[in-house]
Amino acid sequence: MARSKSITCSCEICGKAFFFHYGGKNRYCSFECRIADREDRFWSKVRKTQTCWVWTACISGNNNYGSFKFEGRMQPSHRVAWVLKHGPIPDGLNVLHRCDNPPCVNPDHLFLGTHAENMADMRTKQRQVAPHGSAHGMSKLVEADVIAIRNDTRTHREIAADFGVDPTLIGHVKSGRIWTHVKT
């Protein structure tokens, strides 16, 4: 029976000598040193400014949040910052930003909240106010059209033909289901 070879190495973090079997990938003498290296790698990708700690590595193109490989998978960097500073994130909670700066990983700028709390925080701070009415890129009507449609007594089909829209849209406009910001 062949014996596996062991070699002596020194830990990349503390320098302590340890044994591992030849061919292994262990670079640390203990779990604590492996965690310390992970934290060092994470915080080395942060630029501290007077206000925020800005993530400088991988940034998502669609939402400007940072990403970091943590616990075997890519995760948002602000969530990793929370875990490194405060411990695990309870199920059902999100990590929210007080500063509203997606690449910020300053633990003092982060707090936990539900999805509903996150959406309420977003609306309160007016971070994602969706364009509505004629400002919306897909709008086929303007506010004056809505007033005219609501005052028109013809059938939905006749009105729709005049405005070049679907009769269902006319029904939604007349019932107040859409264009709620327009008062007649």
Image (cartoon, grey):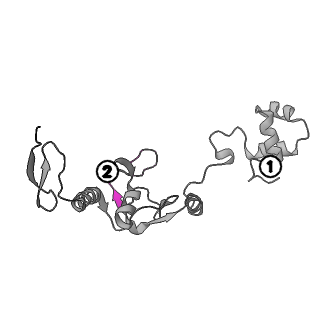
**Residue 31: x and y, percent?**
24, 59
Amino acid of disc 1? Gly
**Residue 92: x and y, percent?**
52, 58
Q: Is residue 30 left or right of residue 114?
A: left
Residue at image position (33%, 65%) is 49
Disc 1 is placed on an element classified as loop
Q: Residues within 10 Å of mark 2 (few under 14, many from 20)?
A: some
Quadrant placement of the N terminus: top left
Could you tell me how many numbered marks the image carries?
2
Residue at image position (18%, 55%) is 28
Label 2 belongs to which residue? 57
Residue at image position (34%, 68%) is 50
Label 2 vs label 1, nearer the camera: 2
Query: In whole angstroms, how far apart are the C-alphas of marks 2 and 1?
Result: 47 Å
**Chain-order first, disc 2 or disc 1:** 2
Amino acid of disc 2? Ala
Residue at image position (38%, 55%) is 77
Q: Quadrant of residue 141?
A: top right
Q: Is residue 20 left or right of residue 114?
A: left
**Residue 130: x and y, percent?**
61, 50
**In front: 168, or 142?**
168
Residue 44 marker: none
Picture layout, residue 139 above or below residue 70 = above
Answer whether residue 169 is magenta in the image.
no
- Image: magenta residue range: 53-65
Q: Residues within 10 Å of mark 1 (few under 14, many from 20)?
A: some
Picture layout, residue 47 above or below residue 153 = below
Disc 2 is placed on an element classified as loop
Label 1 belongs to which residue? 176
